[in-house]
Amino acid sequence: MTELVRCAWGDTAPDYAEYHDNEWGVPLRGQDAMYERVSLEAFQSGLSWITILRKRDAFREAFAGFVPERVAEFGPDDIDRLMNDVGIVRNRAKIEATIRNARAIGELDQPLDTLLWSFAPTAARARPRTMADVPAITPESTAMAKALKRRGFAFVGPTTCYALMQATGMVDDHISTCWRAGVSGR
């Protein structure tokens, strides 16, 4: 059996290989799914993605399956509960941002995924040859961050938004030698 060639980070741990091969760069739609990704990318800020990936099930349980209507109802007791939940990242600012973002979704004049996908680049760009060729931010991720902040979202800077764009298939940053390059279906 031939070993798959992946983006270098995808070969650093079995969890990464699974995520790389089945999720990263695959187009994602749906409000709850996109809210989960926005939330997890915010929690990842300043941490390794593997930390978040390994805690994802605990995050899902702690945040009511990332159903924004349910999380929007969280109050002070829920914040205390989450701050004591060893299964997740216990960062008060990120927890409060996740709740705030759920409430902001309820105020949107369009579905969350429609809003987010409106920032997906339309112009083709060269496929990265190495991960060093992959940008950390783009004009589209900067515009997305500004639009989300105007709508009351928190922990959604340009770098976080670009990571979201990569994770949800708005951009395909699989390197040119990766077996997933160009097979995202976007």
Image (cartoon, grey):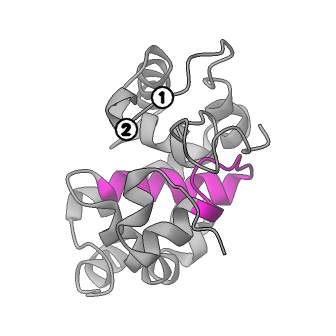
32 drawn magenta: yes
Q: What residue type is labelled 1?
A: Pro
Question: How many numbered circles does the render carry?
Answer: 2
**Image location (x, y in percent) of residue 160:** 37, 40
Residue 153 visible in the snapshot: no
- Residue matched to label 1: 128
> SS at mark 2?
helix
In the image: residue 28, left or right of residue 159:
right
> SS at mark 1?
loop
In the image: residue 106, left or right of residue 150:
right
Residue 92 visible in the snapshot: yes
Task: Write the residue at 45% across / 30% down.
Answer: 129
Picture quadrant where residue 135 is located: top left
Quadrant location, the N terminus: bottom right
Which residue is at the front of the view, 75 or 149?
149
Task: Write the residue at 45% across / 75% down.
Answer: 15
Q: Which amino acid does label 2 sit on?
A: Met
Image: 140 above or below 114: above
Q: Residues within 10 Å of mark 2 (few under 14, many from 20)?
A: some
Image: 24 above or below 52: above
**Image location (x, y in percent) of residue 128:** 48, 29
**Image location (x, y in percent) of residue 184:** 72, 44
**Image location (x, y in percent) of residue 121:** 62, 20
The secondary structure making up most of the magenta span is: helix
The magenta span reads 21-44
Cα gap from disc 2 to disc 1, whole angstroms: 7 Å
Task: Write the residue at 74% across / 49% down.
Answer: 29
- Residue matched to label 2: 131
Residue positioned most to the right? 185
Image: 140 above or below 72: above
Q: Are the residues tagged 2 and 1 within 8 Å (C-beta)?
A: yes
109 drawn magenta: no
